[in-house]
Image (cartoon, rainbow, N blue to C red):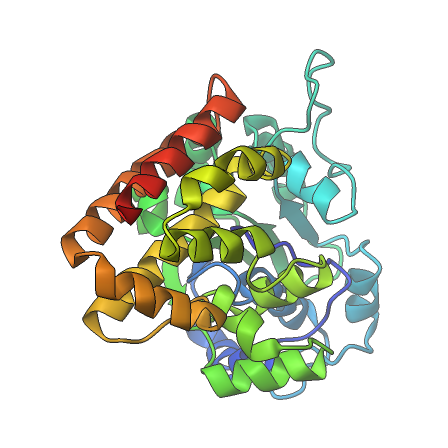
Amino acid sequence: MREQVDMRQEGFLPWHEELASRWLGERDRFAHAWLVHGAAGIGKVRFAKAASASLLCETPVRHLACGTCQACQWLKHGNHPDFRVLRPDAVALAEGEGADDDAPAPDKGKKAPSREIRVDHVRALESWLNVATHRGGARVVLLYPAESLNGVSANAMLKILEEPPPGTVFLLVADKLDRLLPTLVSRCRRLPLAAPGAEEARRWLDACGVADAAEYLAAAGGTPLTALRMSQAGEAACPAWLRQFAQALVERRSQAHIPRLVDELEKMPAGAWIDALQRLFADLMLVHSTGAVRYYPSLAAALAALAQRLPAVTVAEAARWLSTQRDVAAHPLNPRLFIHSVLLRLAAIES
């Protein structure tokens, strides 16, 4: 799932601050374009926004933004003249910002905001890049998620990066580099970000007021911002329907639960419930191989019981099949029939 960080959030997360200070301290060897990448949910977008503030700051402290100078105040209020953000309209709206003001309006016929960075977004940069900076210092372009560049907009961005304007730093944020145009990746220097350790992430979640932080962190695969989002959205670390389905598999009565589960899952995005099922079967495979549970520790007893009865090869085949369903989940012809067929196929392993 993609990280969506409030534009009003400031500063680097604790697990990125030391790296940021070292990296920003090498400005004399700074590349014109950086590709910030790593797992979703670790704070890459927040890192890039804090880095933008640090690059534009006029009185940095340990190479990080001071937060008080005029440039920092402009950026905080979203009106720094030497800073631009490129992101899909759908992302901007999800962050509560509305579509970017300097990007052309989408076609009137479109019913939903675009989930892509359109070529119009990129071309809108060109006239801005040809004008001298307002403060006579750095200029920063932040683009995320880079995977949302389509073929046309990616090539337009590539053209800009091939002949970068002086004094401009491009920060591109991505979860998966293999989804980007290879030539675009080659024009950037990579900056990989790591996830924090479990204890550091748990302490941070505790400080954010997350109850049962360890369970949320496990369900999020160790990515703290995903765990925080789940908690703030009121989602359970382990969904009740998943707990019921796992127990029904143990008791060999899951087929009887399918009609009720279909009614419940139909209200959810397909990707959400398939992700939960994939984590469940990943845990079941882990129990077979190591005895450990990664995502749903509260289901450890049920998973152990299933692992005793089900051969590892059967579990692996079901997990592999489930991953193929993830690829078609976004556009099933009949959502109810799709949910029913997935649950029925998984229930078949209980016998």
Residue 235, located in which quarter of the rendered image? bottom right
Image x and y of residue 236, in percent: 63, 61
Using residue 252 as the reference point, say whether residue 226 is left or right of it. right
In this picture, is 64 found above or below 9? below
In this picture, is 242 found above or below 270? below
User: Is residue 308 visible to the viewer in this orientation of the structure?
Assistant: yes
Residue 8, located in which quarter of the rendered image? bottom right
Residue 229, located in which quarter of the rendered image? bottom right
Residue displayed at 49% across by 75% down: 27
Residue displayed at 45% across by 67% down: 299
Using residue 8 as the reference point, say whether residue 48 is left or right of it. left
Image x and y of residue 221, in percent: 45, 66
Image x and y of residue 7, in percent: 73, 58
Using residue 43 as the reference point, say whether residue 235 is left or right of it. right
User: Is residue 171 visible to the viewer in this orientation of the structure?
Assistant: no
Image x and y of residue 194, in percent: 42, 73
Q: Which sits in the foreground, 7 or 58?
A: 7
Q: Which sits in the foreground, 221 or 135?
A: 221
In this picture, is 275 found above or below 25? above
